[in-house]
Amino acid sequence: MKPLAYRIRPTEFTDVFGQDHLVSQDGVLSLMLKKGKLLSFILYGPPGTGKTTIATIFAEKSEHEFYFFNASTENKQRLKDILDTTAYKDILIVVDEIHRMKKDIQDYLLPFMENGKATVIGLTTLNPYQSVNPAIRSRCHLYEVKKLTDEAIEKAVLNGIHHLDIDIHIDQKALNKIVKFSNHEVRTALNILESASLLLDDGDTLMSHHIDRISGKKHLDLDDHEDHFYDLLSALQKSIRGSDVDASIHYLARLLTLDDLLSIIRRLLVIAYEDIGLANPMMGQKVLAATEAALKVGMPEARIILSTIVIDMALSPKSNTGIIAIDEALSDYENEDCGVIPDHASNRKIKLNPEIYHYPHNDDQSINDQSYMPDKIKDKVYYKPKSESAYEKALSDRLKMIDQIKHKKRD
């Protein structure tokens, strides 16, 4: 028998959860189909969020002949066999793992994309700006398939219950636990539901302890005192950020009992750079070393390593200047006209006239008066150092010295 996740895979956009920006009535993919204007695009996002499902529905609704091509397992000859049909009709090709497409296949495909004989839907779990060849990427629109919310996973599970082989009910705590164990993947959530249903008979209620039995997880009630897994991670981060060492250890202990080292490790690495940052720049390396050691030894010994590094992080000086600087720069670039790269910072312009670029290492103290900001935002300041730690105070002093030298050379 086919798995539940396969049996109830949506066949209409209205049945796709959590991706309204793409598949609602006003979603860009729905509008493409409605207006009959098919454009090549790449869907990117985490596993289990619906990329293949969305692509399949789109292809079936497109009224084009369509084919599936896996870039990691299929070769150029397979693509040639598909594209031979374009002699008399336009086709649509769904390319799974498009980031793995080899150059010879790309080179063969590009002319068909250029002349409109082939419309391509690429699928990838990686960031296409970094992983997909620019020649392919520039000919596609890029659409993110977002990580599914808890609410979207809940809806999928509640829908899945009606398609099981038996008639059961589900307790709210069991539903919450499926959501937590799903890692925001619909397929995983439905697999957990289907496995747990094997423990029940008609009319039974699926309970939290049933989920524990099939998942191998300890029976821990995440809803006691209204606690949830991600709330615990947030509480850990806020405690470290607030330099409350005892609270930090308390929330680490709660998280460790859930036996999910990877989630703890990811959060600690983020904290090292988001909340400690330049106040203690060695902390990032220390956290990385500690978390790698924790993974290597596993539980229960990992608790000692993580406790040690969490104490160090909680008592460390704090600085959030890094995240403030990059978020402000991203906001400006996304929402404002920042202007163009100055000629003396552009390789293309420097090749035409090498004299416009002044090599800093040829100047006194390796500093000259050239500014590399676009003219439109030349006075913008993103990095605003704090003085709470010796290291960032030294950076601040260095920054002031650089500014003084530049101003003196301009004068």
Image: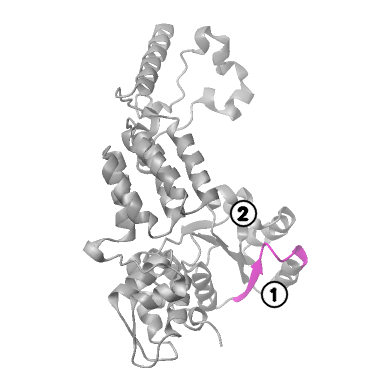
The one of 155 and 81 positioned closer to us in this rendering: 155
Q: Is residue 223 above or below residue 282?
A: below
> How many marks overall?
2
Q: Residues within 10 Å of mark 1 (few under 14, many from 20)?
A: few
Secondary structure category for the residue under label 2? helix
Observer able to see residue 184: yes
Please name the amino acid that badge 1 sits on: Tyr
Q: Is residue 266 visible?
A: no
Magenta part of the chain: 65-77
Q: Is residue 201 left or right of residue 125?
A: left
Q: Position of residue 88 (x, y in %)?
A: 69, 75
Q: Which residue is mark 2?
A: 136
The residue singled out by tag 1 in the image is 88
Look at the image and tell me in which quarter the C terminus lies.
Answer: top left
Camera-side residue of 63 and 331: 331
Q: Is residue 360 magenta?
A: no
Q: Mark 2: give few (<14), some (14-19) or many (20+) Cα within 10 Å.
A: many
Amino acid found under the numbered disc labelled 2: Ile
Tell me if 266 is positioned left or right of 205 in this view. Answer: right
User: What is the distance, in whole Å, between disc 2 and disc 1 at their CAs?
Assistant: 24 Å
Identity of the residue furthest to the left in this view: 225
Closer to viewer: mark 2 or mark 1: 2
In the rendered view, tell whether residue 212 sits above or below residue 159.
above
Within the magenta stretch, is there residue 68? Answer: yes
Q: Quadrant of residue 354?
A: top right
Contact, CB < 8 Å: mark 2 with mark 1? no
- Residue found 63% across the figure and 24% down from its top: 352
Quadrant for residue 396, please give it.
Answer: top left
**93 or 111: nearer the eye?**
93
Query: Which residue sits at x=41%, y=26%?
Result: 375
Q: Position of residue 22 (x, y in %)?
A: 42, 65
